[in-house]
Each structure stands twice: as structure tokens, then as C-alpha cells.
Amino acid sequence: MTVHLHWFLPTGGDGRGLVDRHVYGDGGIGRGRTASGVRPPDVEYLVQIAKAAEQLGFEAVLTPTGTWCEDAWLTTMALAQHTERLKFLVAFRPGVVSPVLAAQMAATYQRITRGRLLLNVVTGGDSAEQRRYGDFLDHDRRYARTAEFLEVVRGAWNGRPYDFHGEHYRVEGGLTALPPDPLPEIFFGGSSAAAGPVAAQHADVYLTWGEPPWQVREKIDWIRRLAQERGREVRFGIRLHTIARDSAREAWATADRLLADLDAETVASAQAALARSESVGQQRMLALHGGGTLDRDRLEIAPNLWAGVGLVRGGAGTALVGSHGDVADRIEEYHDLGVEHFVLSGYPHLEEAYWFGEGVTPELAARGLLATVPPSPLLGVPALNGRPASAPGGAPLIVGGRGR
């Protein structure tokens, strides 16, 4: 089993700090808080990130879903026109669109992009945000609806008329005239008792946020057991931020800078909003950092695992921090537990993609954890003497000193 590396598209905005509008109570609607260095999620900037991810060898990019960010389907379809191999892990919410329509959208997407769609099913853990979409089901009933939704989607992909009568959906003759080829893999997360059976029955990849290894092992054992009871196998992924540098000292200095940009009032406001979430996974994230502490020593909750991101960001709240070798060590540790897919990100997402892709990816390749190694970005680039810059003697020699 090799490692699959994925990056993140910040369709809610990016920046040099821990930028995330949706952690506040109004979901970012009021826009009352501003920060320096914020980058809007315009298509030009997102294209830069997507192209960088493709060049650096990431397999796919994850897009979030919610009222605080751009629509994932439309944004990634635009970006697909600027990339060639990169896949898109499109997050979407069951219950706000018909399952047969979702199946049709996925089939069309696969044909237009020549098979570059992955699906991230987000049931939703915040009732206030769900109500913005007109969804008034409670937490457990949302998961029951998700199970029916995914059953209908897979039924519609069979290419034959499909009937379904459930509590939440009734479909007669549902189908996609041209089923997707290949079928998109379904990524699914959830830490609650209601989420586990849905993942075991319907997910291809169970995705967890970045908890310490011993907690991740417990989740893997839980989902694997539930899947085996249903005669299925599920693969596993993890969602993490990264701060990888040439030395551990440099990486932790960057984490300290991100922490120094925060103040107690900002952290308290974010924590109060996040505490209202019904998501069990979100509550597990909040429990990791000790209730909003700004003490770096207490925020390193396992070797090289830093919970500082979760002080102000909802969802994935931990980062792997250290030298390129340190981060590769931690990825290998999670991989040994059974984690195959690593969905990564960092602030800012453009620069951090290069730090990881140029530093950690070669480490993982040297350990035999990657199926393919991305080519050198200099491959085929002409130098001044007409030879490829990647060839021996091909790059021009730049010598400092006073001209004569």
C-alpha cells in the first residue's frame, strides 16, 4: 500500500495567517473581522494553487463546502480547464440536492474531465448552517438521510431504471443515461455513532481529521470492524495541515509566528462558535488543544502534531510541524496504521504546497511510499546554452562578485 497525497483549495479565502471566516457565529456574513495578507478566492489565484499541486505531484485537491466558500462543483470545473491530470475531491452535502441529480452531475463531470472526479460527502454538523440551506433535520437523521442518498446515487449509476422507497427519498426509475466511468470514489467522514455504519456501508475511503496516532488507530479499528460485519473493505485517509521546513527550528518558528498573530479575544470568539457545533469530530478537535491555550508546549499534542490551527479554524485543526524528515516520519507512522490517503494544506496554500512538494515528497519517495515520483520542474527547461537546465552542465552558472 502506497501513499496518496492530496492538497487543499482554499475557496473561502487564503492568507499568511490562520484565515477562516466560517468559525465565527455569523458564518462570515458580517465580515466584521479583517486581517492583513488575506487573499480572496478568485479563480486566478486558485488556478495558481491547482497548477502548483499538479506540478508537485499531488494526486487531487479537496474543495470545501458551505455557505462561507465558493461552490465546489462550479469552481473545480473551471479549474479543470487549466489542469491536465489533477483530480478534484469535490465536497458536497446530501439533502440539498436530489441524489439522482447528484449522480447525473458526477457522471457529466467524469466525462468532461476524463475521470478526474472524487466525491467527499459532508453530512453536516452545524444545524445553523444546515438551516441556511433549508435543511431542518437533526444530527442523527441527517446521517440516516445520507445513507439513503448514497444508496440512490449508486443505484442510479447502474445504468438501469432504479426504484427506491425510503424514509427520506422516493425514486421511481432513477438512472443516469451514461453512468460515470470510472465510478468516482466516495470519501466520507464522521466520528459519531450515527456516522460509523454509514461509512462502513457506503464509503470507499473513510476520512478522519488529524488526531494523535493512538486515537486514529481506534477509529480505524472501529470502521474496519463495522465494514467487515457488512462484508466490505474500507480504505482510510486523514486530513492534516503541514508546516515543513529545512529544519525543525524553522518549522516551529513558523508555527510560533502563526500563533503570535492571534489574540485571546479572537481565539475566545472562535472557540465559542465552534463549541456550538453538533459534530462529534469537531468536539474531538476542540478537546485536543486544552480549551484555547496559546501555550506552544501544550499545543504539541503528539510528536510533531500541533493543535494550534484548531484555535480559530473549524474542521481540521492540527498540523504536522517539523523538518521534512520529521513530517515524513509522522506520515509513515500514520501509514503504518493503515492510512493511505493524506489530504494536506497549509497557510498560505500556494507557498506551503511548494514547501511540502519540494521537501517532504522526495523523502517519502526515497522510503518507497509513493507509487510515482513527480519529475523535476526543471526537466526540459532550456538554459542559456540551449541545453536542458536539468541536464548536467545545462543550467547557467551564476557567480556573485563585482563586474569587470
Image (cartoon, rainbow, N blue to C red):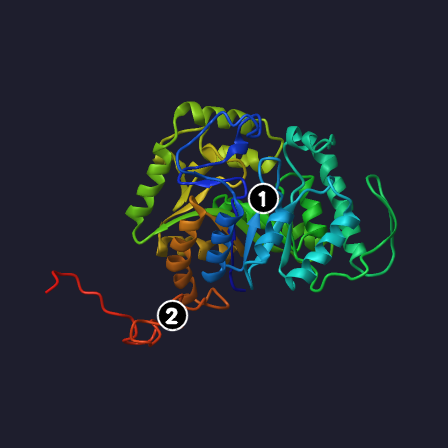
**Count of numbered marks:** 2
Q: Is residue 276 above or below residue 60?
A: above
Location of residue 175 in the rendering, given as x and y in whole percent from the top left corner: 83, 55
Front tag of 2 and 1: 2
Extreme residue in the front direction: 404
Q: Amino acid at mark 1?
A: Pro
Q: Residue tagged by mark 1?
A: 64
Say few, some or many: other residues with alpha carbon within 10 Å of mark 1 (under 14 / 14 to 19 / 20 or more). Answer: many
First along the sequence among labels 2 and 1? 1
Would residue 144 be seen by someone viewing this image from the given angle? yes
| On-image quarter of the C terminus | bottom left
Extreme residue in the top direction: 265
Viewer-proximal residue, 278 or 348? 348
Q: CA distance from mark 2 to mark 1?
A: 35 Å
Viewer-proximal residue, 40 or 352? 40
Would residue 303 be seen by someone viewing this image from the given angle? no
Q: Residue tagged by mark 2?
A: 381
